[in-house]
Amino acid sequence: MSKEKHETAEGILYFDSKKCIHSRNCVLKRPDVFVPNIEGEWIHPENANRSELITLSENCPSGAIEFHPYDSKPSYPLVNTLHIRENGSYAIKANINIDGESEQRLTLCRCGASKSKPLCDGSHSKVGFLATGEPKKKGSEPLNNRNGEVHVEPQKNGPLKLDGNLEICSGTGRTVNRVDQIFLCRCGASKNKPYCDGSHVAINFLSDE
């Protein structure tokens, strides 16, 4: 299993190595909690208090770190967002349903090279993936509802299908589009990134889903 469970006096800290994109936020902000470059146990939530663990969880861009206080329920964003990272992944924050599991944050592959599809594993850096994080804005009306559940459905050998209210944002936060359903390129070959244009067929893109 990729998910580790660490119980503390006030809650449970989870770490999912499959989701981790090695942004290093955790080891740079709290090297006493996520201790780098040691053998054996490297996660020590007992060195932080409740609010500090919540902050660590919220600042993890991939959702690999989650802290669940015993006395609270998961809280989801008031606005569902998907940010397009320069030469990198899609970062989604929402009440996400993927494979029947509920998530709050995920980073999804858009280069086509991840070995953990549909999740990003950082392969875009290794393969030299180039794609703007600042696509052109599309004309769209404000959504009547800006939150709610978003279903992420990777299509077999094809794009990512997202169903639900979602604000598509550039890497710098500029609104690019507002949708309630969208098909996003994840083969890396679309000429109309971030949107699918059918190029997955031409390059014979293969996925695990």
Image (cartoon, rainbow, N blue to C red):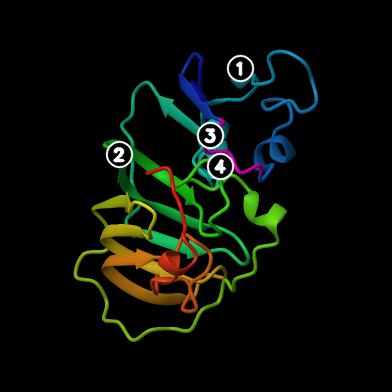
Residue 190 image point, x, y percent: 48, 72
Residue designated by label 3: 18
Distance of label 3 from label 4 (alpha carbons): 10 Å
Q: Secondary structure at mark 4?
A: loop
Disc ID at residue 46: 1
Quadrant housing residue 199:
bottom left
Q: Earlier in the sequence, mark 3 or mark 4?
A: 3
Residue at 48% x, 32% y is 66
Q: Secondary structure at mark 3?
A: loop
Report the mark closest to the observer, 1 or 4: 4
**Quadrant (top left, top right, bottom left, bottom right) of the C terminus:** top left
Horizontal side of 8 relative to 79 (left or right) equals right
Whether residues under marks 3 and 4 lie with C-beta atoms below 8 angstroms apart, the answer is: no
Q: Nearer the viewer, residue 148 or 136?
A: 136
For label 2, the crowd category at 10 Å Cα-Cα, with few meaning under 14, some 14 to 19 and many 20 or more, is few
Disc ID at residue 99: 2
Residue at 79% x, 20% y is 38
Q: Earlier in the sequence, mark 1 or mark 2?
A: 1
Q: Nearer the viewer, residue 28 or 187?
A: 187
Report the mark closest to the observer, 3 or 4: 4
Distance of label 1 from label 2 (alpha carbons): 32 Å
For the view shown, which residue lies furthest in the left direction?
Answer: 144
Residue 156 image point, x, y percent: 34, 51
In the image, which residues are magenta?
Answer: 17-22
Distance of label 1 from label 4 (alpha carbons): 33 Å
Disc ID at residue 115: 4
For the view shown, which residue lies furthest in the bottom direction?
Answer: 139
Give the amino acid at mark 2: Asp
What's the magenta bit mostly, secondary-structure-wise?
loop
